[in-house]
Each structure stands twice: as structure tokens, then as C-alpha cells.
Image: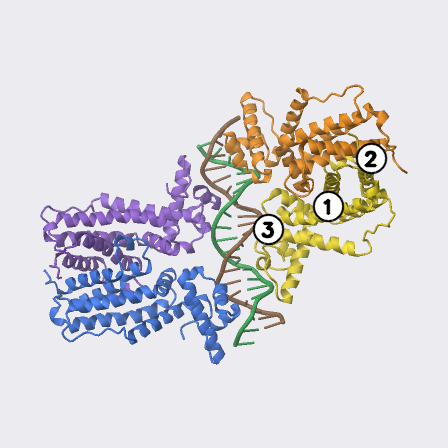
Chain colours: A blue, B purple, C yellow, D orange, E brown, F green
DNA sequence: TATGAATGAGGTTTCATTCAT
DNA sequence: CATGAATGAAACCTCATTCAT
């Protein structure tokens, strides 16, 4: 239960909440959050407007929910057969490609949810949504760290901590524009997506990490 | 004079327009465009609401203006002593660092304008604002191409066209998150900015371009 | 429920709608529809502006309502003791006088409603209001046809269909100026109204219908 | 010079006034007066908004001008070869047909001007426009009186004054709906116009006047 | 006198939120 | 708990009119 959300003790409440969440997910596939009215969410969910307000303090309290849906989806994907596993002696480049392809597929499939949280965190930074985000992204930093450790021998960067952070940042930001807003600049500058994009980015990261650094 | 804007023949009109533009610029430093009402802009500009509508067909017609201010600022910066000039035998790495540092400084200084156009192109993609954007970004693609040509000997990428496009895309997208939303994820993953960020990114690009590609 | 109106399921909604309709009716007694703001209607009805918009899509959606009030009023009048009944052997002249007097009394009593629809159909002919009007006026054409049939022997017009249409047109148009705008030209040309007007017009129609036509 | 209009001493002023009047005439062919903005009139006239206000106190002061154009047009038509002349021994019916046809042709040709004054006198009865109207319509009453006098022998009405007034009222009102709003109810009830309408109405008047009155 | 930029009251409409049922 | 009607602040926009140039 995230901030601004009200406790749901009864079973009925939980079912109602679920209906609202599904309605929100659907609506976000069609338009940005701020163009979705509470009335529309209620209608899609088949409940009354007041019911939404019984579960959520106000419209903004739905933002964390979006994030929550996203998290669940990603976890489901990673837990399933799509989990990434590296062979003991797999090359850095190969692992990077795997990870990037996976990242892209998640990003593309749940673009509407990412878009909503991404935009909203920027429109109303004062909301706590960002916090959740940050925690979650720490995880991605860690997984990058793990990859780097796993292939320690192939990594030539001197300032390892900074390189890890930078790689994590790049990993997260590079897919945002392409995945969330494929038809806007700057995404249109690179006329490929999917695996081509993922591989190209993997190659860049690979070069960055394994190229002997100059003074 | 961009779309939706009305012609200003008299001097007085131009001064009024200037006041409105300045007011808009100021307001955008504080909040996103959609949270700035026309009434507020008018008040900041010290003119009446109707006066804004005499110069601009509707509120959306102000969007291209934001972009225009940005362009002017950038051009002013590049025309000044900050122009980038590459020595004939300057190394790729060195040029990249110069360009990245310059790009960062522009991005950071006019973040509020970029933020406005960036967000609005995402909230209302149907508006033509994005078109201007794209044209403008073509320029950045070209300048990347020029750098690559200038140092053709040092570039090892096979698929040169794709590499150029990818570099241009990265150049544009990597600074967006850090420059426009420095306090949000994913920017917070990389705890440096300014020259450190620029140099790190230059290094990445350098590695990507000059690392002997594997099959 | 007419075009642009939203369904009212609850009793409370219907009561609110009634309040709005009454307020509109009242306001129209004082000024033309386009000089009545939605805010004024809401205030007179003792509801909030938004409430009006919950029942009606926009201001124009109130136009059909005016017509609806009018229809109800007329039906109420005709259903009451004021119903027109012709004796089997009543003379054409006598029937015409009865009908004209009745028509006048309706027209005069609900002048403000007729005025509103009449004016609006002329100011904004693109609105569908006129359609309702036409349907309704077909009825008056039929009733004229019935009278003529009833007194077939006394009617001397050769082109019977055209005469019926003309009589219906006259019946409808002659009362408009006198009834809706009694203080404007051309109404002021004839310094009588009420039964005197009705009788005079009945006489004219009678003469028109029963006078042996010349080639 | 009508009410609300300002004196034009200079030649230039008169030319300006003329341009405004022509512009107004043109605009009214396209839409009702209240949908024509002062700015549009000024633009069509090729003058500045302020110039219109230099000649006319306010927008409403243009109403009398419309009437004035109309009067001039009618007078021009009547003075030209279209003047109505009755033979000494011409029948009442024949004269009536001539007059009605003429009336219809005027009404139809200058419908846009009549429509404007007609509507506006009804939307803002407090304006003095109506006064001018009334004076002008007295003339039409007089011409009806003249016809009746000319054919005194054929007129059987007892209450001659009332009959004259009624005929004048009918003459004026019957053409209004058909001529000004041919596509709205009640005009649509009678599917003819032009000479057919004029003749039918002439016949009705003829019957009314010459039919031996019953007690 | 002519210009047209500037004014600002006032109109329509939206929608997050409240609250009586 | 659920409902959905009601609320009303606030946004956008228009246009008759004024007034500095």
C-alpha cells in the first residue's frame, strides 16, 4: 500500500482496488495520466467515482500504483523462463547483449506504465513517486555491478565504481527515449529499435568497459 | 514567427511580444508549461490576457516560441567565444571531450526551456512542436558526422552510417535525463555531472568508435 | 430527452433538471437566449454551473428543451377544457374563428418560448433545433387539412393541395410577428390583437378558401 | 445620419463611411450581425478598428445604417423602370399581383439586410432601430390604402380602416418568413416561392377584400 | 484624422473532489 | 461500503471598446 492509498480490510475492497488498477493500466495505454480523468477510470473499472476516492486519497495517489503494476510485471517476467543466466565462462559482450535485449523487451512491453511514471515524476517532482523509482533503480545498478564482477578480467576501466554507475545510468536512460517515445526526437535519430538497438548499445558498453583507458 | 503566431508589424507589438516571451521564459524556470496559465504569463509580462491572444492564436502557439528562445540562446553561445574549433591533427578523444563539455553546458544552462519542449512533445505529440525539434536535431547528427569524418582514420566501426546515427542518438539522449531532470531517476544513478559526465560520455563514445569491432 | 442531453436515472437528477428547465423558462421571459449565460441559469435554478453541464452537454443542448417545454404546455392546453371540437354541421367560418382564437391564445401565452426557438433557429440554423420544429409544424398542416376536408363543400379552391399548404403557412406565420414581437414592425401596423386579430385572419382565410377562384 | 453616428464633415470621412457601409453589407450576406465582429468589418473595409469607432459611437450604431442601405436600394428599385403603375381601369386582382410580385422581388434581393434589422430589432428591442422601421412601414400602409382607394368599387369590407391595416400587416409579415428564412419553419410548409407565392398571396388578399362580408 | 495594439470583463467549459442517499 | 449527483474554482478564449502613436 503506497502513500495516499487507504487500507482495504475487506475482500470486497480488495476486489474494487483491483478493478481500479486494471482500469488505470488500460487507460494509460491510450493516453497520458493527466489526460485520464478520475471519472474515466471509474467508468472503465465499473465503479463509482466516490469509490475511487474511498480507496485513494486523491488522483495523485494513483501514481504509485502505476509503479507497482510495473514492478509486478517485471518481476513476473524475470521469475519466469525469461530469467537471465550467464554461463561461467560467457564473454562480457555476450552477457551484455543478453541483458540489453531483455531490458529492451521489458521496456517496450510496459512502455505505457513507464511513460506514465516517467512523465509524472517530471511534471510533479514533489510527489513521492520518484522515491520508489530510485529504490528500484538501485537494483539495476547492482545487476550491472554483478555483470562487471562476473567478467572482472575483461574490464579495463580504472575508476571501477564510476564506470559501474555510468553504465547503470546509460543502461536506464538509453532505453527511455527509444522505448517510451519512439516517434519523438531524439529517438528518431537512430532508425532502429529492438535487437538492433540493444546490440548496438551492448557493443558500446562493451567497448567502453573493455577498451584500455588512456590517461 | 512560428505557427499560430500572429504577425507583429509595429515596434510596439514586438516589444510586447518580447515581454511575453520573457515572462514565459521566467515562468518555465518555476514550473512545467501546462501548470502556467495564460493569465499568469500575462501578469508576469505586465500585459492583459487579451494581449497575449493578440500575438498568439492560443496557448499552444507559445510552444514553438520556447523552442525559438532556446535556439537563439544556443546560437548566441556558439557564436561567442565558446565556438568549438578542432585543430587539424587533434585526436578524436580530445574533440569528443570538447564537444561533450560544450553540449552539457548548453543543456544545463537552458534546461528549463528544453524541459518544456521535451515534456510537451510527449504530452501532446500531435502538436507540430516536435517537427521543429527534429529539424534541429538533424543538425546535431550532421555535426557528429563531421567529427567522424574529421578523424576517419581513428574510427573502426564497420557499419559507419549506423554508428553515426547511434552516436547522434546517444549524444542527444544521454544529456536529457541528467540535464533536464537531475534529481529524478535515472539521473541519480550517476552521481556526477558537468565535466565529469561529459568526459565519461566522451570516453564511452571514443571507445565505441575506435575499438576494433568483433564479428 | 433531446440531443445533447445526458440521461437522468435518479430522482434527484430529475428534480435538478426540472429546476434548470424552470430557471430557463423564467429567464427567457426577460431576454433572448443568447443573452442568458449558463451562470445565470444555474443561479436562478439554485444549482452550481457544473450541475447544468452534468445534465446538458453544452449550452446549445438547452435549445431543444425550450421547445420541449413549449410542446408540453400546448399539449396541456389542448388536453384541458380548451380542446377544439367542431360540430358536424358547423360552418367553415365558425371553425376557422375557433381555431384562430385558440392558436392565438397559445401563441400569446407561451410567446417567450416560441421567441427563443424562433430566434435561435434563425441565428444558428446549423443546430438541429429546427428539425424538431418542422416535425411539429407538420401537425399543424394536417389539422388545416382536416378542417378543409371537414368543410369540403364550402371550399372552392381548385389547386387544393397548394391552398392547404398556403393556409398552413399563413396560419403559422401570421401569428409569429404579432404574438412574438408585438411591439416591433410589422406587428404595429395592425393595432389590434387577441380575438380581433384572430377573427380578422379567420375571415381572410375563409374568403380565400370559399371565394370562387378566377382564371 | 442616424442615432449613434458621428458627423462627417470632410470628404475623406464620407469616403471612409462609405467603405464601412459596403463592408457591412457584404458581411451580412454571409452571417447575422451579431456574428460579425467590428474587427471583421474594419478589415473588409480596409480601415482600422478605431476608424469605425470614429464614425460610429458603438457597434449598435451600425444597425440604423443597415436600414438606410435597405431604404436606398428599395428607392432605387422603385424609381427605376421597376416602378409599379396601375392602369386607370385595372382590376384589383391584377394590381395586387403586380404589387406582391414586386414586393417579393425586393424582399428576396435584399434579404440579408432585412434579416439583419429584423433579427436585431428582436434581439435588442431597446435600440431605436425599430423606430425607423415603423416610419418606413407606414409608407407601405399608405400604398395599400392607395390601392384600396383606387379600386374602391371592388372592395366589400365594411370596416375599411381595419381591413387596410390588416392587409398592410399581412403584406409585410407574410414575406418575412418566406423571404428571410426560406429554409426554416414555417416557411418550409409552403413549398413555393417567387411568383407563385406572390400570386397566391395576392389572391388571398383579393378574396379577403372583395368577398362580401358576413355578419 | 487614422491606426491598430492593448484592454479586461465576461462567457463557456472541465474536472478533482465532496457528500447526501 | 458504494453510489453518482452536485460543487465551484479555475482554465481558456472572445471581442467591444479605448487610447497612445
Q: Give me the residue at 62% from left, 67% from top.
A: C10
10 Å neighbourhood of mark 3: few (<14), some, or many (≥20)?
A: some
From the top left corner, tell me how far across and down residue A40 is, in percent: 48, 63
C128 and C197: which one is in front?
Answer: C128
Q: Are marks 2 and 1 on the same chain?
A: yes
Residue under circle 2?
C211
What's the distance in space between the residues labelled 1 and 3, CA to CA? Answer: 28 Å
Q: Looking at the rendered structure, which numbered label has been put on residue C60?
A: 3
Residue under circle 1?
C141
Judged left or right of residue B100, residue D206 is right
Judged left or right of residue C163, residue A77 is left
Q: Are marks 2 and 3 on the same chain?
A: yes
Q: Is residue A164 above or below residue F9?
A: below
Helix or strand or loop: what does disc 2 sit on?
loop
**Residue C179 in view:** yes
Q: Residue furthest bottom?
A: A10
Amino acid at each position: 500500500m503506497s502513500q495516499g492509498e487507504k487500507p482495504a480490510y475487506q475482500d470486497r475492497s480488495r476486489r474494487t482496488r483491483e478493478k481500479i488498477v486494471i482500469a488505470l493500466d488500460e487507460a494509460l495505454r491510450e493516453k497520458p495520466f493527466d489526460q485520464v480523468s478520475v471519472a474515466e477510470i471509474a467508468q472503465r473499472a465499473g465503479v463509482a467515482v466516490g469509490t475511487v476516492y474511498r480507496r485513494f486519497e486523491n488522483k495523485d495517489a494513483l501514481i504509485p500504483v502505476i509503479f507497482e503494476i510495473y514492478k509486478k510485471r517485471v518481476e513476473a517476467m524475470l521469475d519466469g523462463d525469461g530469467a537471465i543466466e550467464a554461463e561461467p565462462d560467457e564473454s562480457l559482450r555476450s552477457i551484455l547483449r543478453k541483458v540489453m535485449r531483455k531490458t529492451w523487451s521489458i521496456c517496450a512491453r510496459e512502455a505505457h506504465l513507464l511513460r506514465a511514471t516517467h512523465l509524472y515524476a517530471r511534471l510533479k517532482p514533489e510527489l513521492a513517486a520518484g522515491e520508489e523509482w530510485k529504490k528500484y533503480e538501485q537494483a539495476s545498478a547492482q545487476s550491472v555491478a554483478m555483470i562487471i564482477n562476473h567478467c572482472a578480467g575483461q574490464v579495463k576501466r580504472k575508476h571501477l565504481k564510476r564506470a559501474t554507475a555510468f553504465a547503470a545510468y546509460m543502461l536506464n536512460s538509453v532505453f527511455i527515449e527509444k522505448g517510451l517515445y519512439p516517434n519523438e526526437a531524439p529517438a528518431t535519430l537512430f532508425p532502429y529499435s529492438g535487437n538492433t538497438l540493444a546490440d548496438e548499445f551492448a557493443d558500446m558498453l562493451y567497448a567502453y568497459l573493455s577498451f584500455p583507458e588512456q590517461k
